[in-house]
Amino acid sequence: MIHYDPKWNLDKNSLEFIKFLIKAFNIKKVLEIGTYNGYTAHELSKITKVTSIERNQNNTYPEGFQVIYGDALTVIPTLNSTFDLILIDATKKEYIEYIKLLEKYKIINNNTIIIADNVISHKNKVQNYLDYVKENYHSFTLDIGKGLEISKK
């Protein structure tokens, strides 16, 4: 059983919004960058296929979603698939590097929805990411939870 941790897990309203998007847009494949205790991946895997990248190799997770252990900056270049939705919720200062790697290795396609968490609560740490997506994507900040940035090509 995975327990919800309000300090570290995706806010419940944010999670419900993402579940809504998955159902509304018939999203088949989700990439989560930053697994923590697996709560979000577990919940999303009830309605779609989830692959999650987690740096901490000591964590173990229940069945239902794929975990790739390693630093996202080294794992992203090894992915050989596109995803319908990408959820970024890992090291805040690396958000900008994640998106650029996702682009470089063509993990993002024109239909991919990209969601970054903590963009209000950690705005100073993700400002370069916000500037980049607002200039290069259709992007807006949604004031739920700790702030979600929703972006699409």
Image (cartoon, rainbow, N blue to C red):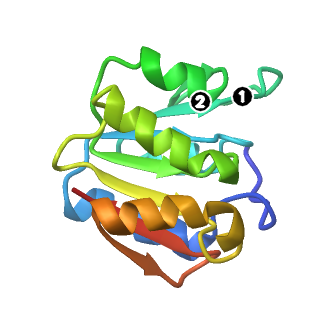
Q: What residue is shown at x 34% (from left), y 30% (from top)?
A: 104
User: Considering only order in the chain, which callout, 2 or 1, is on the residue closer to the N terminus?
Assistant: 1
In the rendering, at what x and y percent does residue 27 appear? Answer: 25, 49
Q: Secondary structure at mark 2?
A: helix
Read off the residue under disc 1. Answer: 55
Residue annotated with mark 2: 72
SS at mark 1?
loop
Q: Amino acid at mark 2?
A: Ala
Q: Quadrant of residue 78?
A: top left
- Mark 1 near mark 2, Cβ–Cβ under 8 Å? yes
- Left or right: 46 in relation to 8: left
| Residue 25: image location, x then y, percent | 19, 59
Q: Split into 4 quadrants, where in the image is the C terminus?
A: bottom left
Q: Residue at x 51, y 58 (%)?
A: 129
Asked if 89 appears above or below 100 in the picture, the reply is below
Of the residues shown, which amino acid type is indicated by label 1? Arg
